[in-house]
Image (spheres, helix red, strand yellow):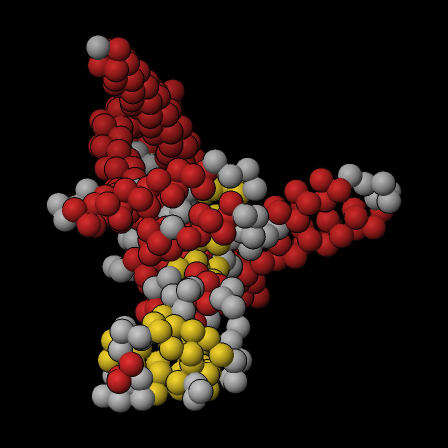
Amino acid sequence: MFHIKRKEKCTVSESGLSSVMKRLVKAVMVFICAAAGYQISKLILERSWWPNVTLIHPIGTTVFIILLSACFGFILAPLFWLGLTKFGQFSEAKLQNTSVSDLIVSLMGLILGLMLANLIALPMSRIPGGVGVYIAVLLNIALGYLGLRFFSKRRNDFWNFITNIGDIKFKITRKKKKNNASENLDEESDMSSDFYYSTPKILDTSAIIDGRILDVAQTGFLEGTIVLPRFILAELQGVADSTDPLRRTRGRRGLSVVTELQKIEALSIEIPETTLKELERDKVDEALVVLARQINGKVVTTDYNLNQIAQIEGVSVLNVNDLANSLKPMLLPGENVEIDIIRVGKENHQGVGYLDDGTMLVVEDGYKRIGERVKVTVTSMLQTSAGRMVFGRIRQQ
């Protein structure tokens, strides 16, 4: 009931403001037209147009033209107000899905285009016959439009350039402050300053559902700003609402991981209201790469395909699988391990077993020892983003 009353109150206030603005526009139009009528009456009297009327009744002629012009403004005001409201609604609909950064960059392009047009038009204004004025108007329209168009098309590059300049100036200022500060500066404030300037890390849905990123953060190896775009949370919510029990369980686990990440004090969780439409992409993976380029961040994922796409686009990637593989105990050729051979390998003569950390070990001529525990000598290793694979042969007694 409260929300309904509040909504009605807002509607009444908006309609009241619209009525006041409408009357104000009507008054301004009447005043402008009346002033224009006064100037027209002065011109008629000076040029002696209609001498039979103006010479006999000059004051009456002036009053008549002013009143006639004011009536014209009174009649024209509703049409002007209608056009103004239509233009406002059109602009609002077009700019509703436009980000502030895009507006700023486009406005900069328009301003630079107009400045360049006026610089070019300045010497042309001396052309006799008033031709320079028309050239100046055309140049302003053309270069203003070109500047707006060019900057809007390259808005991502220009916005990255602007933010990079801001970061450099901020870091220089920070460095000067550090040099001028006393040696007894609190270590905790210094750490918080470094934390503020850490590279943003954008979490992919696969990394959230995987869950290991939470363990990394809880141990203190992950800090700084963690970015969770709205479209990632929407995708995660879609997985959690799935009719498939397995997908629903994975999605709910991902949501619980996000909740736990928000509780970690060393992390600053940001949820930008960025949509796929604003990034001009249809797929989530492509949108993540574009967003990472815009904010100069890194993508955290376990998805092999996203990893490859990001590397092609020149975006840094933190692959959780690579981190897990790098933390596994290193096995060198010649070392001996004991494993249980549980199945046949890709080749008929191979046997496959697993180390305690889950690493696959392919044993040459191990197909005869399936189901047995044997000692294996490591011969080589293969390291990929998908995991580590170890090759060996059965140790001869």
Within the image, what quadrant is residue 47 found in?
top left
The residue closer to the viewer here, 283 or 79, is 283
Quadrant where the C terminus is found in the figure: bottom left
Residue under the image location 86 percent in, 44 percent down: 183
Closest to the observer, 325 or 372 = 372
The residue sitting at 52% across, 68% down in the picture is 329
Q: Position of residue 354 (x, y in %)?
A: 36, 70
> Which residue is outermost to the front?
397
In this view of the protein, which residue sits in the foreground, 70 or 213? 213
Q: Is residue 38 visible in the rendered structure shown here?
A: no
| Residue at 22%, 32% in the rendered image | 82
Q: Residue at x 85, y 40 (%)?
A: 184
Residue 240: % across, % down: 23, 43
Would residue 152 appear left or right of 5 to someone viewing this image?
Answer: right
* Residue 243 relative to residue 157: left or right: left
In the image, residue 132 sits, relative to residue 311, either above or below, namely above
How many numbered discs? 0
Q: Is residue 14 above or below residue 173?
A: above
Residue 61, image x, y percentages: 33, 24
Between 260 and 219, the one lying in front of the other is 219
Where 221 falls versus 390 (above or below)?
A: above
Q: Tell me: residue 386, above or below residue 206.
A: below
Which residue ends up furthest to the left in the rendered image? 243
User: Which quadrant is home to the N terminus?
Assistant: top left
Q: Is residue 24 visible?
A: yes
Residue 156 falls in image quadrant: bottom left
Q: Is residue 11 left or right of residue 31?
A: left
Image location of residue 357, percent across then percent down? 42, 64
